[in-house]
Amino acid sequence: MNAARSSTPLHFLGQFLRNPRELGSVLPSSRFLTKALVDEIDFSAARRVVELGPGTGVFTREVLQRLPGTGRLLALETNQSFVSRLRVELPDPRLDVAHLSAERVHDRVRECGWSDVDVVISGIPYALLPRQTTARIVQSSWGALAPGGLLVGYQYSPYLRPFLQRIFGNCRMKLVLLNVPPAVVFVSRKAPAEVRPPLATQGS
Ligand SMILES: C[S@@+](CC[C@H](N)C(=O)[O-])C[C@H]1O[C@@H](n2cnc3c(N)ncnc32)[C@H](O)[C@@H]1O
């Protein structure tokens, strides 16, 4: 591990002391939580991925390792210190780190010229946000996803479940004990596109 990687928890703690509500935890996610979350993604089908709240980039690094060469990863982060760090530490042409709130994810995807994305990964501390902000982020993530696309995120409680149930209509949860604190991984899938009969057979 190089010096920059090993200072990650200290950088994270320093930012937590300055902005506790923005970060929501004192440490980055553990490698167990990272694996539990990233393992939910089928990288043979994922080309465009968005990450909300990358922090010091524990999920970002894992996604870049698994993402195909033609894939793209757009990360939205409100903390300028993390944005600067990720841009320096991860100069990967597939990665674009934007200093922007997750509430704007659908707008940003359109600004990139993309019709939609395959996966949204969320590291946002929703339980500390106003409920309307959480609803806007989940709604905007749903809007950005392709039919059949996946939202995967985590929290330290089941807080997010009703938002995902209401907007996606489904939500699977799994507990990850090996994290400080233990976490719940949430997985929701946007409904696939409606299957319509070919035009020639319609109305016949
Ligand atoms: C609990 S930390 C998670 C960091 C990293 N994903 C991890 O698992 O270690 C939450 C991150 O979300 C960022 N964040 C908080 N509110 C945000 C928002 N509205 N839009 C984008 N990022 C946000 C924080 O700055 C912080 O980096």
Image: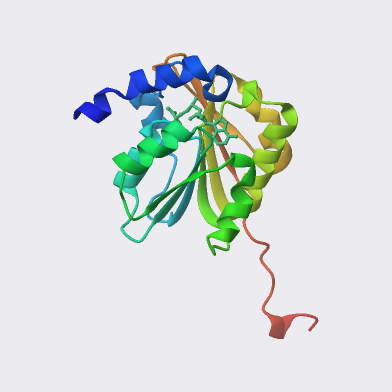
In the image, residue 202 lies at what x, y percent? 75, 80
Q: Give the residue drawn at x 44%, y 39%.
A: 40
In the image, residue 129 lies at what x, y percent? 66, 25
Colouring used for the render: rainbow
Q: Looking at the image, can residue 147 be seen? A: no
In the image, residue 155 lies at what x, y percent? 55, 24
Q: Give the residue drawn at x 66%, y 36%.
A: 164
Left or right, 153 with respect to 55, comes to right
Quadrant containing the N terminus in the rendered view = top left
Left or right, 87 with respect to 204, comes to left
In the image, residue 186 lies at what x, y percent? 55, 32
Q: Give the residue drawn at x 53%, y 55%.
A: 117
Please tell me in which quadrant of the rendered image residue 84 appears.
top left
Along the line of sight, which residue is nearer the eye, 165 or 81? 81
Q: Looking at the image, can residue 122 be seen? A: yes
Q: How many marks are shown on the rendered structure?
A: 0
Along the line of sight, which residue is nearer the eye, 17 or 54? 17
